[in-house]
Amino acid sequence: MKTKLRITLSIGAGLVLVAAWLLSLSTFSVPEAQAAVESATFSIVTSDFNIELEPDGAITGTVTAVGGEPMFDFFVEACLLDESACYYAWTDSDGNYSIIPLPADDYRVMVEERDGWKRDYYDDTPYKDEITPVTVNSGESTIGIDFILEPGGTISGWVQDSVGDPIEGIQVAACDYNNDTRCWWAFEQSEGDGSYAIPGMATGQYRVQAYSVIDGYWIAEFYNDTVDYDQATVVSATEGITTTGINFELVERRFIYLPLVMK
């Protein structure tokens, strides 16, 4: 489909554009720019452009649990493989979703973990580096991009300081012990009682770390009681099971303030 567009720049719009351009030059002040615009002579320029518009495509499918139950209000995301753009939708009461409009391209499609259900990339993997790309063609719906969700494992514990007081607002992450690109995070930072939980995890062995997100007041620590990456204790997660007692005792970061000497 081809559409012919006639683009006309009005005198008023031209005056505004020229004034803005003049002001962007450091040699022009506001009065000088205004005077230059008022004394200028403008002509109307019209041009014809042929623009070929490609109709959009779509990705559709269904999200269900292992037993066939439709999963309602789950977030489904389709990202270009270079992650320069992402599109999304939520499932309806029947577990159906439709991501539209989508430019023709290849996409990475994922259902986000929720309520203990493991995240799932198409086709049936929790890992971004194992995906099957989904191709969208112009003007067509790519159908049957379905997901069957499985319950994930959970790692939980608490974060406290050296005297046993709970620390709120600490982020806790668990990464595959042999592949740091495969990580899960607690949806919420540690609560007022210091508790945290990382749900929806794949079965595996993990390196778990607690760290301060904003101010860096607390020294980051790996489980179990070490700042050394290589000395982190392996923590196992199993789908459908909660691993408890992965606790952290963080130490305050010490700051040294030196007096300012004026000469």
Image (tube, helix red, strand yellow):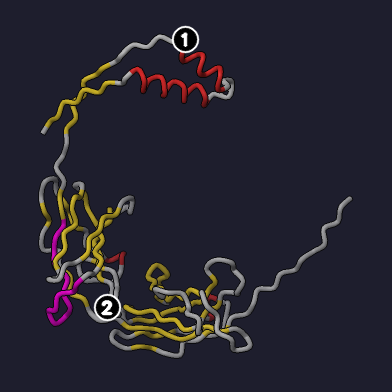
Q: Can residue 117 be seen in this view?
A: yes
Foreground mark, 2 or 1?
1
Q: Within 10 Å of the Cα at label 2, are there few (<14), some (14-19), or many (20+) other Cα atoms?
A: many
* Amino acid found under the numbered disc labelled 1: Ser
Spatial CA distance of label 2 from label 1 is: 69 Å
Q: Residue at x 46, y 79 (%)?
A: 208
Q: Where 157 sits versus 54, above or below?
A: below
Q: Which residue is drawn at 50% across and 81% down?
A: 192
Q: Where 164 sits versus 42, above or below?
A: below
Give yes or no for residue 215 being in the magenta stretch: no
Secondary structure at badge 1 equals: helix
Residue placed most toward the observer, 229 or 53:
53
Where, quadrant-wise, is the N terminus in this rendering? top left
* Residue range corresponding to the magenta coloring: 59-72
Task: Using residue 176 as the reference point, say whether residue 92 is left or right of it.
Answer: left
Give yes or no for residue 64 being in the magenta stretch: yes
The x, y position of residue 22, in whole percent, is 50, 21
Task: Using residue 234 as the reference point, say whether residue 229 is left or right of it.
Answer: right
Closer to the N terminus: mark 2 or mark 1?
Answer: 1
Secondary structure at badge 2 equals: loop
The x, y position of residue 253, in whole percent, is 65, 73
Residue under numbered circle 1: 39
Q: Which residue is drawn at 69% across and 73% down?
A: 254
Task: Using residue 206 as the reference point, say whether residue 263 is left or right of it.
Answer: right
Q: Which mark is residue 117?
A: 2
Residue placed most toward the observer, 235 or 8:
8
The x, y position of residue 90, in whole percent, is 22, 64
* Amino acid found under the numbered disc labelled 2: Trp
